[in-house]
Image (cartoon, grey):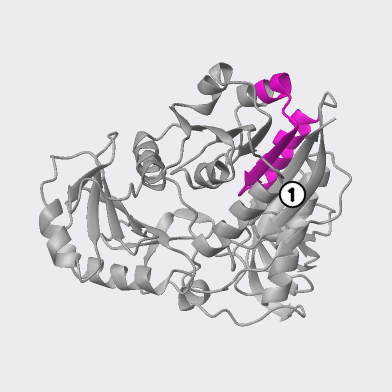
Amino acid sequence: MEEVVRIERIAAGGDGVGHLADGRAVFVPRAAAGDLALISITRQATRFARARIRELVEPGPDRIEPLCSHYRDDDCGGCQLQHLNAASQREARRRIAGDALRRIGKQTVEDPVLTPAAADWGYRTKITLTRGTSGRLGFHRVDRPDSVFPLDRCPVAAPGVNDLWVRFRQSRGLWPASLARVVLRLDRTGGEHVIIETGEGPIWTGGKTLQAAVRRAASLTVWWRPFEGAVRAVGGSDTAYPAAAFEQINPAMGDQVRAAAIAALGNVTGQRIWDLYAGIGETSALLAERGARVQSVEWDRRAVEEAERRHREAGLTVDRVVGSVEAAVASLGHPDQVITNPPRTGMDPRVIEALKTRAPARIVYISCDPATLARDIARLASSAEFRVLSAECYDLFPQTAHVESVAVLERV
């Protein structure tokens, strides 16, 4: 089925949205607001449809030629908005965040202010490649998660990541036969990390050989995550930075987010502050430096060990808890204020209930998903315990439909 539609806006996820002749919304990847396009329907539902552009009849005013050949020619699914100019991309991300707060969070707010990225290209310090049926590593195609195209280079990735990718793919003869995915990552100290993920198969013993082949001047650690197993260092230092631990893939912008979150707490001297989903303890360290009594919670033991090392070297005192946040909050002391930075899935309902029961004066919520942020805000505000004081966005993921948000909730 084909139809000509006018694209009206960009929706969450990055698709353009228009309406079919029968009134249903239609979601179209790689579309721009104002496009007039002949589309081909790829999926039908009662209230909506999905489609692909078959012919661009009239381009919208914000449409540009994408920089990346993989985006143009291979339908790379890693980016969603390369076909839009930078200003319209930023506006789309603001609208996505604002729409989530209004529609899901039930808040009466304008679209949040967005702090632009320091760099629109070459910012990403981590990429994940999947092994396709051809045996070559690459990225997934948009709307076709089972299809992988071979990667040449990624202009969104930092130059050092692309350089590491060149060296890694030249070592193909050393890859384990059961290789399923590989993560390439740079840490803040300049160290390089290769995380090998394998399917079912024999124990892999080639980590040191691969590390020697791929390493150049920088420190490089090879990690192995066996099928249904824990990640471990198999080449290089086994005390290296924990490459599987969470860290922002845009470190410069991540620092701005962290600074804004801490500033929102005001004077924390002598206060008990919860740092939930604490990662490697960077936020905890900044809070402790400001005189706070910090209780941090993180489930990843290696991340907590890295946090402990950093805090010890800096002479900082932090009460660190290893475990899930939902299990730990019941045993923590009453917080004066809270910083929470959960994964994309948001906070467990048990954490929400603990926050409502403990009723800290302020909660600063850092989120990479406007929808789950809005959902959790609605839950926190459902009984009028908290109200949203402010919400801001930070442009950590240019060329994509993703955005980082910092929301400040105040006890009523």
- Answer above or below: position of 253 versus 69: above
Residue 385 to residue 346: above or below: above
User: Residue 210 location, x and y as percent?
Assistant: 15, 59
Magenta-drawn segment: 354-381
In the drawing, does residue 359 fall left or right of residue 283? right
Secondary structure of the residue carrying tag 1 is strand
**Vertical placement of residue 279 versus 6, above or below:** above
**Does residue 358 belong to the magenta stretch?**
yes
Report the side of 82 relative to 243 (left or right). Answer: right
**Residue in front for this viewpoint, 263 or 246:** 263
Pick the quarter of the image with the C terminus.
top right
For the point 48% across and 75% down, the residue is: 73
Residue at (62% x, 54% y) in the render: 259
- Is residue 95 at all visible to an observer of this figure? yes
Q: Amino acid at mark 1?
A: Phe
Q: How many marks?
A: 1
Q: Is residue 77 visible?
A: no
| Image quadrant in which you'd find residue 154 | bottom left
Q: Is residue 83 left or right of residue 177?
A: right
Q: Is residue 225 left or right of residue 385?
A: left
- Residue 140 locus on image (x, y percent): 44, 59
Q: In which quadrant is the N terminus drawn?
A: bottom right
Q: Position of residue 226 (x, y in %)?
A: 24, 40
Q: Residue at x 19, y 66 (%)?
A: 214
Q: Which residue is mark 1?
A: 48
